Image (spheres, helix red, strand yellow):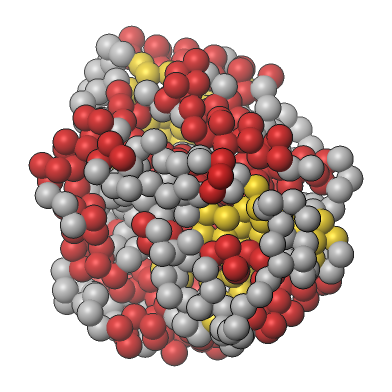
Amino acid sequence: MDNNTQPLNIATESFIELSGRERAQAVLDAGSFRELIGPFDRMTSPHLPLQGIVAQSDDGVIVGRGTIDGEPAVAIALEGAFQGGGIGEVCGAKISGALEQVLRDHEKGIKTRPVLLLETGGVRLQEGNYGLLAIAEIGAAIMALRPYTPVVSVISGMIGCYGGMSICAAGLSSHLIMTRQGRLQLNGSEVIEQEAGIQEMDASDRSRIWSMVGGEQRVAAGFADTLVNDDIHEINEAIHDVFRQGIREVTRTAQVDRYLALLAAVDANTLIVPSSIRESWKSGIVDQENLQSQLGAQQAQANDSVVEAPITRGRTWFEALSGQSASAQQGIASVLCADTELENQQVRYISVVPNPNARFVRARQGEIGLEEGWNIARSIREAIEADKDGEKRAIVAIVDVPSQAYGYREEVLGIHLSCGSAVDAYASARLAGHPVIALIVGNAISGAFLAHGMQANRLLALDDEKVTVQVMSKQSAARITRRSIEQLNEAATKVPGAAYDIRSFAKLGALDQLIEGIEADQPQDKDIERIQQYLIAAIAETRQGPRDLSVRLTSATAATGRASSIKVRQLLAEQWD
């Protein structure tokens, strides 16, 4: 037994009461736990001390190698006691890097079983875009693994699972296990209260929050798979059952038509009682008579109160590049999709734009809401299906998204799954051989950017002061981190990942091109032609390159901008076997 191998010796049957290290040990076969990149490796966050925050030697993530039912396995546990289980650069790289190692095992014929033990508030706001990139890479690794093995996630309680990790847990994982104490929510209640007001969400009303997003409700509504008690043995048995059952062929996020029909049957103007959606949403059965009545009433209301949509960069660049008017689009008005030819190859452009007449009021300013994520997914999956036997068209995500939608209805009806459907679709297209390019022309904020753009093979952005990338608004970030706006601005001068401007984001090495000298708001022919040339080059490079996101860590800029992400992966490779 080496120094990192420890037997499990605990005096409780409660999973919630265990530390992250104990939880990782508990789900592996007795005596098989071996920790990778442990405390003695001193792989700490380089960004927290710059902000006066004491770093932790494992950065809040435990990666344990061992066995489950005698088969090779890895258990990855987030430690909620450190920074609320937030995802920063180092801990995010430990998660994504470990999943990437599992994928390499399967490619070599070693059937390694991955388990994620999630207690996390989402992206660690002090590290901002480092965490956003890491979550995109975690999602990409899960998607690549799913054809080989079930990827199991467990949410047991105390912290819950929020932010982009809720997309990974419920939207991308093969199977999600929850206790009643666990919570699953894209937007934290405090953030919803900050962004939408206390009438929309009272963050102090704990019983209401649990009734919306607690484990019992999430399983009953079909957003999670298995409800268990807070018991080590029961959770272990549930994990073992998943691997015995094998790979799930159809995931929730692939069931686009089903969830769009369920959403269509919802009256967006009335208060939704969480328990009222349990039976219909889990079964997927829609009352067709009620649906037609509902759609008719909604259409009549829409005709009575039509408000003209504003012109945004997302709409401007969609029309400029596709040559099609936004007003001529089919489907919902907030998701634009069009095919055109670019240098004798077919390209599908997708953009999300404001729709003042949207059914769900929290998604009227260009946010990605309940309907937007699923409609993005539909647009992509149509292309995948149409091209399955021929040349794979390029898919260009035109990115100008202020955020995901913050609202009560959004959380009850699973906005995390809506965003997850878009992530799943973009990643599926990329893995199927479609060149996926993201062109950032405006805002690229939070879960909206994860859903629409972050799974691209290549990221291009306009070098413009109105182009911003970050996790959430400064006001909400200040409230959550209990810092002032001035303190956030000061942190951004020390930590590029905490900044909002596109040039700071470029320092992280993930951008393929930062394009200068473009008239962003009113592009002329020469501007459009220049962008088209950049797209042609990016598409050609993608067709010749890997289908994963590894290119983001191979640039000269990434060598310094994300040095810790690279180092973590090197250490994992050295310690894996």
Quadrant in the picture for residue 233 = bottom right
- The residue drawn where x is 69% and y is 51% is 3
The residue lying toward the viewer, choosing from 525 and 508, is: 508
Judge from the rendering whether residue 34 lies leftward or rightward of residue 493; answer left or right: right
Q: Quadrant of the C terminus?
A: top right
- The residue drawn where x is 52% and y is 34% is 565
User: Where residue 474 sits: x, y (%)?
Assistant: 19, 47
User: Where residue 105 sits: x, y (%)?
Assistant: 80, 44
Q: Quadrant of the N terminus?
A: bottom right
- The residue drawn where x is 16% and y is 52% is 483
Mark yes or no: residue 18 visible: yes
Judge from the rendering whether residue 73 lies leftward or rightward of residue 515; answer left or right: right
Q: Is residue 401 above or below residue 457?
A: below
User: Where residue 202 sits: x, y (%)?
Assistant: 21, 77
Q: Is residue 530 above or below residue 48?
A: above
Furthest toward the right, the residue is 109
